[in-house]
Each structure stands twice: as C-alpha cells, then as structure tokens.
Image (spheres, grey):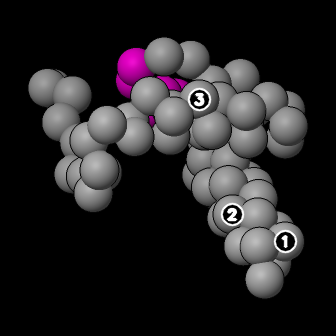
C-alpha cells in the first residue's frame, strides 16, 4: 500500500515548522512519534497529539490578544 496523504499545508514553506511542532506536541503527551509513517499509532495516541497541537495554538492566539 502506498503512503499517500490528503493533508495539505496552505504554506508549503511551513512544512518543516509544522513537523517540528507536531513532534514537540507528541513528546509533551508521551507519544513516540517517528519521521514518516505512523500508522501503528492508536486512535487515542493520534488524537492526543492533535489535541495538544490545538491546545497550544489556542494558547498562542489568546496570548496575542
């Protein structure tokens, strides 16, 4: 099975920063995320990484107000 992704970044230059942000969020919630394919993660683990990313983005926005 080919590794295809429907995720699109609106600003391609931001990909490296978004990957770093995702890795930081994963380490904060204790999920062992690796470069490339992470299909072995449980839904709970993947959701906790995404949730942590959203939480940090909201905190950043609130601080800018």
Q: Along the polypeptide, which appears first: circle 1 or circle 2?
A: 2
Distance in Å between CA atoms under marks 3 and 2? 14 Å
Query: Which residues lie in the magenta part?
Result: 36-40
Q: Which residue is mark 2?
A: 57
Q: Is there any visible trace of residue 43 in the rendered image?
A: yes
> Does residue 25 sit above or below 33 in this rendering?
below
Position of the N terminus by quadrant: top left
| SS of the residue under disc 3 | helix
Q: Along the polypeptide, which appears first: circle 1 or circle 3?
A: 3
Q: Along the polypeptide, which appears first: circle 3 or circle 2?
A: 3
Position of the C terminus by quadrant: bottom right
Residue occupying the far bottom of the picture: 65
Q: Say which residue appears at 71% left-offset and 23% top-offset.
A: 32
Residue occupying the far left of the picture: 2
Q: Which residue is mark 1?
A: 63
> Does residue 58 sit above or below 53 in this rendering?
below
Q: How crowded is the residue under tag 1: few (<14 C-alpha within 10 Å), some, or many (20+)?
A: few
Q: Which residue is mark 3?
A: 20
Name the spot of residue 15 as percent of width and height, x first: 38, 36
Q: Say which residue appears at 85% left-offset and 37% top-offset.
A: 28
Name the spot of residue 55 as percent of width and height, x first: 77, 65
Distance in Å between CA atoms under marks 1 and 3? 21 Å
Name the spot of residue 29 as percent of width and height, x first: 84, 41
């Amino acid at each position: 099975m080919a590794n295809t992704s429907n995720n699109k970044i609106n600003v391609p230059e931001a990909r490296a920063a978004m990957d770093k942000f995702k890795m930081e969020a994963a380490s904060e919630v204790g999920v062992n995320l690796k470069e490339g394919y992470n299909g072995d993660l449980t839904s709970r683990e993947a959701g906790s990484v995404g949730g942590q990313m959203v939480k940090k983005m909201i905190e950043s926005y609130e601080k800018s107000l």
